[in-house]
Image (cartoon, rainbow, N blue to C red):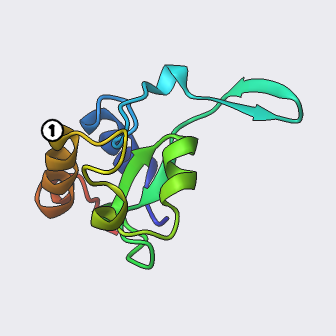
Amino acid sequence: HKITKNEWESCLKYFDYKCAYCGLPMEEHYNMYAGKLRWENLNKEHVIHNGGNDLTNCVPACKSCNDSKWKYNLNEWYNSNNINYTQERYDKIIKWLMEDCFTYIEEK
């Protein structure tokens, strides 16, 4: 991703420091690595698999959601068949991608 630290922080804050898809809070985002459970930041997830690398195609995602979604586009994966789906989170993702992210893009 070509996202500045400030842009990423704005994205995290917009999504209340939670996974945009399942709502897992960042402070509860742990991953097993080398046999040890460790905390890690949420992933910068491409909403459109082969889409852009900037803020207009990025949401925070936990490892589980990021791994599950990987090659799928948003509507293929995040819909009423997905156990983590809520209309409220979906609407927030769409609002971020279509409108609100542009407020936080820094001039390069």
Query: Could you say whether the residue bearing mark 1 is in a helix, strand or loop?
Result: helix
Q: Residue furthest right?
A: 34
Q: Is residue 41 left or right of residue 101?
A: right
Toward which corner of the image does residue 50 lie, by quadrant? Answer: bottom left
29 above or below 58?
Answer: above
Residue in view at x 16 percent, y 43 percent: 87
* Number of marks in picture: 1
Residue closest to the eye, 18 or 13: 18
| Residue at image coords 40%, 37% | 19
Q: Nearer the viewer, residue 4 or 49?
A: 49
The quarter of the image holding the C terminus is bottom left
Q: Residue at x 47, y 27 (%)?
A: 26
Residue at the outermost front position: 81
In front here: 9 or 47? 47
The type of residue carrying mark 1 is: Glu
Give coordinates of residue 13: x percent, y percent: 30, 33
Crowd band around label 1 with a 10 angstrom C-alpha radius: few (<14), some (14–19), many (20+) = few
Query: Quarter of the image holding residue 75?
Result: bottom left
User: Up-down: is 21 above or below 52?
Assistant: above
Q: Point out residue 33 in the picture as x, y percentages from the top left corner.
A: 81, 36
Residue 66 picture location, percent across and down: 52, 52
Q: Which residue is mark 1?
A: 88
Q: Is residue 19 above or below residue 105?
A: above
Q: Is residue 31 left or right of residue 6?
A: right
Residue 32 spot, x, y in % from top left: 76, 32
Q: Is residue 67 left or right of residue 83?
A: right
